[in-house]
Image: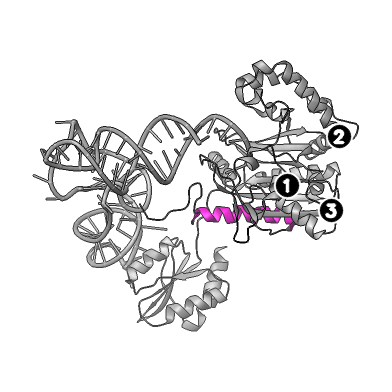
Amino acid sequence: MPEYRAPVGTRDVLPPESARWAGLVARFATQVGRAGYGLVVSPMFEDVEVFGRVGETTDVVRKEMYDFEDKGGRRIALRPEGTASLVRAFVQHRPPTPFKAWYAAPSFRYERPQAGRYRQHHQLGVEVLGSEDADIDVEVIALADGLFREIGLTQVDLHLNSLGDDRCRPAYREALIEWFTARRGDLCDEHRERIAENPLRILDCKRPECRAVSEGAPRMVDMLCEDCAPHFARVRAGLDALGIAYTVDPRLVRGLDYYTRTTFEFAAAALESSQNGIGGGGRYDGLAEALGGDPTPGIGFGLGVERILLACDAEGVFGAPDAAVDVFVIDTTGGDAALAITHELRAAGVAADRAFDNRSWKAQLKAAQRAGAALAISVEAEGITIRTLREKGQAEPVDRADIVEHVRKRLAAAD
RNA sequence: GUGGCCGUAGCUCAGUUGGUUAGAGCGCCAGGUUGUGGUCCUGGAAGUCGGGGGUUCGAAUCCCCUCGGUCACCCCA
């Protein structure tokens, strides 16, 4: 074993797998760019309070945060998710609203790794600040849905819920506390003592005891106030209008405290593991204010790159593309022909590669085939020839000065 | 943080009840063959058997510790 390896819970992404990453990010960037979202690059770490402020009762913040003191004595945390950083940036810079942003960035959580769970994972996300229009909720959900379709995933289930707002959630909370307190003895050990702290989390508990108790519990969707109810109705109508299938799941509770109103998760049915959540998000109308800004509604989502690719593997879609150059330059003359010709081809926009280290003609040809090249240019003492590689063909002589033009014609003819 | 399983070549693995210089396939390198071309043939490089300690005449093999991987719980992307 090597002396040094990637830290626990992290991994290196090498070709050809890395090409899938690049492809996924590129497709995402194209889709959200088309919808008017601009890229935001923000720091991977923040003052720990930025995250502490938004999830005090959540495991992500309480137990899993990568926090440390820097050399200046500041309390720093690597970001566990993207939304808090982005909203902090929004509050700091006050861009015009609606502010529509996207990001592709790593997130860090200190937990034991397992299938589809890493200490450093990568999220693709969007956030919209400054609009409470339900159509924005629909747009955001449609963007995630559109990405899945774009890359060929078909077995993705959308779960939808509304968590209400400051006006209706407190009453719901009380109703839940009342419900669970009356049945305290039937809850699992952990939640028996934490009813008042965050009763909504019990709805999300997977233990059979809790599930049984939750079964008949009050539902937020039945207690939405006169603002939240029509908002939720309009979100549903919008999704229906776009033909996006969803399931209303009254027990859907997100893992972060800041969510209000619309919340959603995407689950990959092809992944059997409990790590089948490939993305989620929702509205966070109080978050900007909690981070010191003006009250500003917001909504967004985060999608897990690693998990999306696992889901792609499970469905057999969006495989790693074959890396292939157009032309491979073989040179047995030992001069600078390979150097110069490869350079010229690249400058002309042709994907070109070559061998190094004075390998034999045969070895260079094998390298050309391994590189997936369509054409090989062979520079030998007797002259320069060009030949096709993907199917067997005659080697044709070509003049040194005509190479680029000749290659262009051959490639154009092949398309 | 808790628990199960697993660590032998770059990769996938074999290695008998503990017994001599630890093997195969793929990949890599070289040579041969094939129209100088994906095949085929021959050869080569490459492993402190994850690390440390113990038992033993003798450990890849048995025991302990440790590190790592993996899976599950918890939680989440």
In the rendered structure, which segment of residues is drawn in magenta? A13-38
Classify 10 Å Cα crowding around label 2: few (below 14), some (14-19), many (20 and above).
many
Classify 10 Å Cα crowding around label 3: few (below 14), some (14-19), many (20 and above).
some
Q: Main secondary structure of the magenta part?
A: helix
Q: Nearer the viewer, residue A15 or A377?
A: A15
Where's residue A170, x and y in %? 82, 30
Q: The disc numbered 3 marks a residue on which chain?
A: A
The residue identified by callout 3 is A98
Please give the name of the residue rendered at 63% of the width and 56% of the height, measured from the top-left corner. A44
- Mark 2 or mark 3, earlier in chain: 3
The picture quadrant where one finds residue A213 is top right
Q: Is residue B76 left or right of residue A343?
A: right
Where's residue A42, x and y in %? 69, 58
Could one spot residue A154 in this view of the protein?
A: no
Q: Is residue A410 magenta?
A: no
Mark 2 and mark 3 residues within 8 Å of each other at the beta carbon: no
The tag on residue A228 is 2
Quadrant of the rendering where the C terminus of chain A is positioned: bottom right
- Mark 2 or mark 1, earlier in chain: 1
Please, is residue A190 above or below residue A18 in the view?
above
Mark 2 and mark 1 residues within 8 Å of each other at the beta carbon: no
Display colour scheme = one colour
Q: Is residue A368 left or right of residue A119?
A: left
The residue identified by callout 1 is A143
Q: The disc numbered 1 marks a residue on which chain?
A: A
* Identity, as a three-letter code, of the amino acid under mark 1: Leu
Is label 3 in a helix, a strand or a loop? Answer: loop
- Spatial separation of the CA atoms under disc 2 and disc 3: 20 Å
The picture quadrant where one finds residue A337 is bottom left
Q: Nearer the viewer, residue A1 or A355?
A: A1
